[in-house]
Amino acid sequence: MLLTMLVDIDHLLASPIYDPQRCSINFHPLHSYWAIAIYAVLLVPVKTRIIGFGLLLHMLLDWQDCYYQVVFWFE
């Protein structure tokens, strides 16, 4: 599960590397909707199920950051 955090290596491709106002979902290549679909497919085989679950959990947490960023921005 901890190794699924390596998906954040694609943040190094962005300029600037960290932007607190940027949503990483569908911005970074490994956070794109296509990649998320592949992560969901990883849930099917038993051997890759824990990796797929970890990656989808990572995407859910990144989406949560985007959602709360927008909600608090409007307040």
Image (spheres, helix red, strand yellow):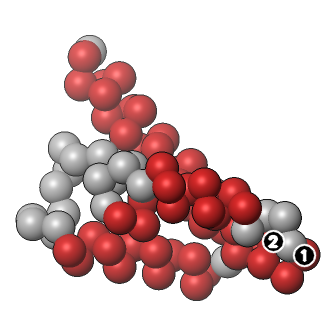
The answer to whether the residue labelled 2 contacts the one labelled 1, judged by CB atoms less than 8 Å apart, is yes
Residue visible at 32% across and 74% down in the picture:
10
Look at the picture and state if 4 lies above or below 75: below
Q: CA separation, marks 2 and 1?
A: 5 Å
Q: Give x and y (percent) for residue 37.
A: 60, 54
Q: What secondary structure is marked by label 2? A: helix
Residue visible at 56% across and 49% down in the picture:
60
- Residue 49 marker: 2
Give the total of numbered labels.
2
- Residue 46 marker: 1
Q: Give x and y (percent) for residue 7.
A: 46, 74
Q: Is residue 53 visible?
A: no
Q: Give x and y (percent) for residue 16.
A: 9, 65
| Of the pair 21 and 9, the residue shown nearer to us | 9
Give the quarter of the image for residue 40: bottom right
Locate residue 25 relative to residue 55 in the image: left or right: left
Locate residue 69 relative to residue 51 in the image: left or right: left
Q: Residues within 10 Å of mark 2 (few under 14, many from 20)?
A: some
Locate residue 41 relative to residue 37 in the image: left or right: right
- Residue 28 marker: none
Give the quadrant of the N terminus: bottom right
Q: What secondary structure is marked by label 1? A: helix
Q: Is residue 73 visible?
A: yes
Residue visible at 48% across and 41% down in the picture:
64
Could you tell me the amino acid type at mark 2? Arg
Give the quadrant of the C terminus: top left
Residue visible at 39% across and 33% down in the picture:
68
Could you tell me the amino acid type at mark 1? Val
Look at the picture and state if 23 lies above or below 42: above
